[in-house]
Image: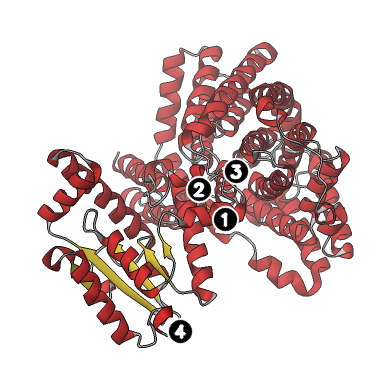
Amino acid sequence: MEKQLIIALGREFGSGGHIIAQQLADHYQIPLYDHNLLNHIATERNVNHENLKKYDEHPKNPFLTRTVRGYSNSPEENIARMQFEYIRKKADAGESFVLVGRCGESILKENPNMISIFVLGDEEQKIQRTMERNHISREKAKRMMEQHDYKRKTYHNHYSKGKWGDSRNFDLSINSSKLGLDETTSILIDYIDRRHPIATPMDEN
Amino acid sequence: MLAQILAIIIFIIMFALIILDKFERHITTLVCGLATIVLVFGLSMHSMNAFLETLNLRHIFSIGFWYEAGTVTESSSGINWATILFLAGMMIMVEGMARAGFFRWLCMTIANAVHYQVIPIFITFMIMSFVLAMFIDSITVILFLAAVTVELAQLLRFNPIPMILSEIFCANLGGSATMCGDPPNIIIGTSLRYTFTDFITNTGLMAVLSLVVMVLFFYFCYRKEFSTTSGAVTENMEHLSPKSAIKDKKAFLISCIIFLCAVVLLITHAQTGLTVAFIGVLIALITLITAGKEAIDLLKSIDYKTLLFFIGLFLVVGGLEQSGILELVASFIGDVSGGNMKIMIAIIIWVSAIASAFVDNIPFAATMIPIIKTLAATTGADLSVLAWTLAMGTDIGGSATPIGASANVVGTSIAAREGHPISWKQYCKSAIPATFIVILISMVCIYVRYL
């Protein structure tokens, strides 16, 4: 790949956004960064990954948090900022990657090679997918979806100016329930290729 | 009556906004301060005098503000300009020291002196944290100490969290020992006209006694964590050498001399008659003059937001004071205790400690000062005993939770930024018992010594 390509993909819980992100990363043969970002950070800093994982993409509790001269006691906030810093470093170094969540569309807004996508889905489809993936009842799946989306929304809105899932903040918002995951990925590839003509896979170069 | 209601509402809103942390603290206090001027002094009290007394500018132009020739004048209310000038002066001095590499040099010298053995580093860093925080703000102490601890932890392969938690606690404890260690003490000292010696011989003794107990407490809490670490370092020795910390030899020497001068001036200020406001301004001027071209950068490095926070805070508390609310609170405490000094002390120390564990101890202390003054005047209680009780309660109570004091926030943040997040549970596990023990020690000391 000659020119840098960054795909920042936000998603609703159960929309299959993560699978789509993986398919895009496979197609363009670029790394996928999601919760594995903390693995990289932990290795780099020689610390235990497990200690960081529990705070990943979690909103901070405003009642248990205080900020002094730009320092916050919230582990969630510090881990988030650590990830943002790592992502910016990768982007500034010219690396191509797919980034899932983590306010990617907002923190890499200034990067001209970034394409931002938000994947949403119909509630029924999202519930079905969550039930199948986690082997849980419909009720539990619905609750799980609501909880995760609430966390993602709170997390996102704390660090970004734009609201979570607001189509005005993304280059493209797409409902994965209408065409299915594979077709959605195809449309996204088509869009990315038009936006980014050199973004063809390595083996096709 | 209207003035009292408005003053309380503004005060509650200010506290709530500080806790919610939605806006920067200085914005919150300044807006609430402005509301106090307009709504309490203006619309309700129609009192220009109350406004001018709270603004307290006349005080700066009196000789007594800069030099007290042994006479104790009537303490002033309203904006405590002495605290603000002293803090600004110390900020400039500390920034100069930091730029010269003083703090890193000190940490590395001590680590080197104990041959990079983990347990000795653990103990000496606790003591160093205590001693430095006696003279320098605990944020700066922890800023450097925590960063060096993480660095040493990586090289010596130990978990830095227990060490950072112990350092934070000892920094808060050290701050309680002197008049200039912790902002509540500076406010108490300047408002009630106590000297550095008054603090060191009262809260200082309690703090030193508590330090001995706390070193043992943290040692027994965490000794297992450090027993498995290797200790001796074999690589990157050059990076750890104290000499490598010094960025500019001349600046380093000058900053050491200025720091020593500041310590001497503070210790002897009761004898020389120089006020802390004078010392703050003098130290700042010397630092700026010796800094040469860097003087502008030093001025820029002043934490203006904290100073503005203080100004707004004093205005809001001034509103409470002028409207007579704090007298009501004082009489309530007097009634509850039935004038019994033991109960009064227990109420002040435990309420201060518990409140400071969750809310900023600076507004709490600033509010409590007029209350203890009234309490002493109406019940005949010894004001100094109430002052030491308030100082220990607010200074130590802040250690109990990650948000109780600024040093806790900065220390936990530095640890997290380096990949060692500290949860509330992890923090409170050792901090709550430690705080409880020190408050108990302080209360017993006060009972035995003063009653």
Q: Which residue is mark 4?
A: A3
Disc 1/disc 3 C-alpha distance (Å): 17 Å
Instruction: Say above or below: B446 vs B393.
Output: above
**Chain at numbered mark 1:** B
Q: Position of residue A119 (x, y in %)?
A: 23, 65
- In screen coordinates, is B1 left or right of B105? left
Q: Do marks 4 and 1 share a subunit?
A: no
Q: Report crowding for label 2: few under 14, some 14 to 19, many 20 or more residues within 10 A (C-alpha).
A: many
Amino acid carrying label 4: it is Lys
In the rendered image, the quadrant that contains the C terminus of chain B is top right
Residue B314 numbered tag: 2
Q: Which residue is mark 3?
A: B407
Q: Which residue is mark 1?
A: B307
Disc 2/disc 4 C-alpha distance (Å): 57 Å
Q: Position of residue A26 (x, y in %)?
A: 37, 68
Q: Report crowding for label 3: few under 14, some 14 to 19, many 20 or more residues within 10 A (C-alpha).
A: many
- In screen coordinates, is B214 left or right of B348? right
Disc 4/disc 1 C-alpha distance (Å): 49 Å
Q: Are marks 3 and 4 in contact (CB under 8 Å)?
A: no
Instruction: Say above or below: B160 vs B148.
Output: above
Instruction: Say above or below: A64 vs A56.
Output: above
Could you tell me which secondary element the residue under label 2 belongs to? helix
Residue B127 numbered tag: none
Along the viewing direction, whichever of A31 and B206 lies nearer the viewer: A31
Amino acid carrying label 2: it is Phe
Along the viewing direction, whichever of A97 and A103 lies nearer the viewer: A97
Q: Report crowding for label 4: few under 14, some 14 to 19, many 20 or more residues within 10 A (C-alpha).
A: some
Could you tell me which secondary element the residue under label 3 belongs to? helix
Disc 3/disc 4 C-alpha distance (Å): 46 Å
